[in-house]
């Protein structure tokens, strides 16, 4: 197990702190749901992780309770999704880009992507509106890598100033990651605005999605606003035999835009941003297409 060691902290002290943190999380989780372990293998890099997930009966209970409660959100955080696994593979494959880098993952779920990003050496912040998701993500990070992410509980649908006030004081992020968070139309604008605010001027968005209409609309909206990039595709096999073709999009913000920590002079022409990865691949994402309805609950 790799340990996160503060320069002034002896490895034994770091071990003890990680163990204490793990047992605190264990106690907190035990009071809320039953869990079980699941081992998965990342299809591209072959990395194997064992993660704590809700037990099958508690998974079903959480969904049944949410469905019976008006206006509640379904607990999609309680499952392992192909996009999260695909993005985990990308994090391992591109580990040199993550070492020591401030990274934010939006909608971390159970933390499969987070585990890989931590293993790759990222200085990882994870955001989700589910406190149980954040606890499981921290637990799974610690269990698999000896490191925990910085958890941030917030709803990106809250008005931007409210969320930003909560995130105030954070550094800008060089990379923002997200896996399968776009399945409701109402999320498109708030998510794009939040990313625009939190990503550093030369930062990159790594977005994994399994072909949902809402994600396509998000990509079209971003493209119309000048975001550019390229796409890699992954076909699994995915845990639980789920079938999906996942697109992992690497997007850079429009040049000359104003954003978090940026002092880009109004009207001053900015150079084209450096492109990472293969050129021309799915570049200039499709221009606006017809709007689609929400598409929750697809593969
Ligand atoms: C389909 S799950 C994907 C989880 C994980 N990224 C993965 O791929 O396994 C969507 C995640 O986004 C979170 N989420 C959805 N809407 C949110 C919102 N408005 N604010 C914060 N988190 C949200 C959910 O709690 C869940 O963890």
Image: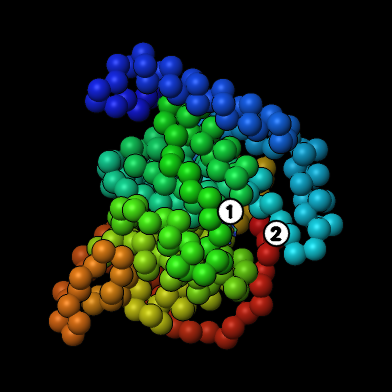
User: Mark 1 vs ligand 1: CB under 8 Å?
Assistant: yes
Lateral position of residue 216 relative to residue 14, left or right: right
**Label 1 belongs to which residue?**
129
Task: Examine the rendered structure and indicate whether residue 25 appears above or below residue 214.
Answer: above
Question: Is residue 29 visible to us here?
Answer: yes
Location of residue 237 with respect to 232 vertically, above or below: above
- Name the residue rendered at 48%, 44% in the picture: 151
CB of mark 2 near ligand 1 (< 8 Å) = yes
Please identify the quarter of the rendering in which residue 98 is found. top left
Q: What colouring style does the render use?
A: rainbow
Q: Residue furthest top?
A: 12
Q: Which quadrant does the N terminus fall into?
A: top left
Q: Quadrant of residue 256?
A: bottom left
- In space, the residues marked 1 and 2 are separated at their CA atoms by 10 Å
Q: Do the residues labelled 1 and 2 touch (CB within 8 Å)?
A: yes
Indicate the position of residue 116 as horizontal and vertical percent values. 44, 39
Q: Assess disc 2: are there few (<14), some (14-19) or many (≥20) residues with their C-alpha within 10 Å of its C-alpha.
A: few
Residue 175, disc:
none
Residue occupying image coordinates x 45% and y 56%? 166
* Residue 41, horizontal then vertical, whole percent: 53, 36
Residue 12 versus residue 181 in the image, above or below? above
- The image shows residue 123, relative to residue 73, as above or below, that is above
User: SS of the residue at dot 2?
Assistant: loop
In-image side of 116 versus 263 (left or right): right
- Find numbered disc 1 in the image and state the secondary structure of the residue it sits on: loop
The residue at the point 20 percent across, 82 percent down is: 266
Front residue of this view, candidates 70 and 80 = 70
Mark 1: few/some/many CA within 10 Å (<14, 14-19, 20+): some
Q: Nearer the viewer, residue 188 or 210?
A: 188
Marking on residue 73: 2
């Amino acid at each position: 197990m790799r340990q996160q060691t503060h320069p002034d902290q002896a490895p034994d002290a770091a071990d003890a702190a990680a163990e204490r943190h793990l047992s605190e999380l264990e106690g907190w989780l035990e009071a809320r749901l039953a869990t079980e372990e699941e081992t998965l293998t990342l299809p591209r890099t072959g990395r194997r992780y064992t993660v704590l997930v809700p037990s099958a009966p508690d998974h079903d209970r959480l969904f049944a309770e949410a469905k019976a409660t008006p206006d509640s959100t379904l607990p999609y955080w309680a499952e392992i999704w192909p996009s999260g696994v695909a993005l985990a593979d990308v994090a391992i494959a591109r580990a040199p880009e993550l070492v020591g880098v401030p990274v934010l993952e939006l909608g971390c779920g159970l933390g499969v992507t987070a585990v890989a990003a931590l293993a790759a050496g990222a200085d990882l912040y994870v955001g989700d509106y589910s406190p149980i998701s954040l606890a499981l993500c921290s637990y799974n990070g610690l269990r698999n890598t000896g490191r925990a992410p910085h958890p941030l509980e917030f709803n990106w649908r809250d008005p931007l100033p409210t969320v930003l006030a909560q995130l105030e004081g954070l550094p800008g992020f060089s990379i923002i990651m997200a896996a399968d968070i776009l399945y409701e139309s109402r999320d498109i604008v708030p998510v794009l605005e939040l990313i625009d605010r939190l990503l550093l001027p030369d930062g990159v968005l790594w977005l994994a999605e399994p072909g949902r209409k809402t994600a396509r609309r998000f990509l079209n909206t971003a493209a119309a606003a000048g975001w550019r990039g390229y796409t890699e595709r992954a076909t699994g096999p995915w845990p639980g035999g789920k079938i999906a073709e996942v697109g992992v999009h690497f997007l850079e913000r429009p040049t000359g835009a104003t954003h978090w920590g940026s002092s880009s002079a109004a009207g001053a022409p900015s150079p084209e941003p450096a492109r990472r990865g293969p050129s021309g691949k799915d570049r200039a994402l499709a221009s606006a297409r017809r709007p689609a309805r929400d598409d929750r609950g697809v593969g």
